[in-house]
């Protein structure tokens, strides 16, 4: 067995199963980092759009005019919730036989559907990050255990066991654990951070939904 303990040499000399584990962990790490950057961009944009829409909404302008401005295009966040609620409110209010509370309930249901869709969009890829963060250390540990087993099995074929014989095998096996941690730690940190960001946005969206429902309720009874 080679006594060269460089990273590349250890990976090349590892058993096929350990190499497969390393490749899987490296692939998981690359995908995780791609999703981490993607979620950072999406959540940053969601916060900015929420700030912009709240500023426009609470500026005291006409809701019908705001609805027209938000019509068309790919709506997300508060704009999507507002558009869904006001659209249903305006549609139901045209029917004089519908009670005001029924109009409000219809608008509220539409806003909840829009809210659910928005949360699904924001939570995309978070489950994958959680999976990588929870399973990568165990996958790496499996590769390490397998590599150490092969290393000690090889010692049975020699009369005198020395550290120089067993060190490379153990070192290459431990690389799998290191790669498992390398994949898991960023995924766990990102998942916790982004889950908290999504939870805060959800609370913000729900608060707006309740406040907008109150406004629609006053308009319905006034009408």
Image (cartoon, rainbow, N blue to C red):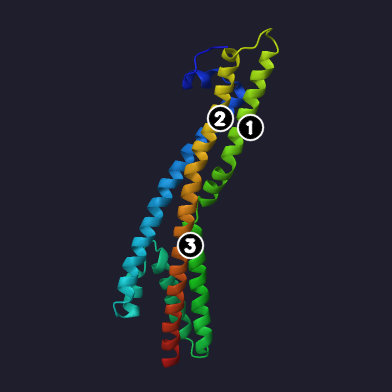
The residues tagged by marks 3 and 1 sit, at their Cα atoms, a distance apart of: 34 Å
Tell me whether the residue at label 2 lies in contact with that at label 1, contact meaning CB atoms closer than 8 angstroms.
yes
141 lies above or below 213: above
Q: Tag 2's secondary structure?
A: helix
17 or 1: nearer the eye? 1
Near mark 3 (Cα within 10 A), the count class, few <14, some 14-19 or many ≥20, is some
103 lies above or below 83: below
Badge number at residue 79: none
Left or right? Give the position of 90 relative to 3: left
Give the quadrant of residue 216: bottom left
Q: Look at mark 2 in the image and give the residue it sits on.
A: 176
Q: Tag 1's secondary structure?
A: helix
Say which residue appears at 37% left-offset and 61% top-offset: 47
Label located before the other in sequence (2 or 1): 1
Q: Tag 3's secondary structure?
A: helix
Left or right? Give the position of 46 relative to 183: left
Q: Position of residue 125 (x, y in %)?
A: 50, 50
Say which residue appears at 51% left-offset and 51% top-offset: 126
Q: Position of residue 87 (x, y in %)?
A: 43, 76
72 or 116: nearer the eye? 116
The residues tagged by marks 2 and 1 sit, at their Cα atoms, a distance apart of: 8 Å
The residues tagged by marks 2 and 3 sit, at their Cα atoms, a distance apart of: 34 Å
Badge number at residue 142: 1
Q: Is residue 223 visible in this depiction of the protein? A: no
Near mark 1 (Cα within 10 A), the count class, few <14, some 14-19 or many ≥20, is some
Q: Nearer the viewer, mark 2 or mark 3?
A: 2
Q: Look at mark 3 in the image and give the residue it sits on.
A: 199
Say which residue appears at 60% left-offset and 35% top-offset: 139
Label located before the other in sequence (2 or 3): 2
């Amino acid at each position: 067995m080679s006594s060269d303990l460089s990273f590349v040499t250890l990976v090349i000399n590892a058993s096929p199963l350990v190499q497969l584990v390393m490749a899987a962990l490296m692939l998981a790490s690359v995908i995780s980092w791609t999703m981490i950057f993607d979620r950072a961009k999406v959540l940053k944009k969601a916060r900015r759009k929420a700030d912009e829409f709240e500023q426009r909404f609470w500026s005291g302008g006409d809701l019908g005019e705001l609805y027209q401005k938000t019509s068309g295009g790919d709506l997300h966040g508060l704009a999507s919730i507002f558009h869904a609620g006001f659209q249903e409110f305006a549609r139901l209010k045209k029917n004089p036989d519908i009670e005001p509370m029924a109009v409000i309930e219809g608008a509220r249901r539409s806003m909840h559907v829009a809210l659910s869709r928005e949360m699904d969009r924001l939570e995309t890829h978070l489950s994958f990050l959680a999976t990588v963060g929870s399973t990568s250390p165990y996958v790496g540990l499996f590769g390490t255990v397998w590599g150490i087993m092969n290393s000690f099995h090889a010692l049975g074929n020699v009369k005198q066991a020395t550290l120089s014989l067993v060190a490379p095998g153990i070192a290459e096996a431990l690389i799998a654990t290191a790669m498992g941690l390398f994949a898991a730690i960023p995924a766990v940190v990102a998942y916790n951070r982004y889950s908290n960001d999504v939870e805060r946005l959800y609370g913000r969206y729900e608060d707006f939904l309740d406040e907008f429902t109150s406004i629609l309720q006053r308009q319905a009874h006034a009408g």
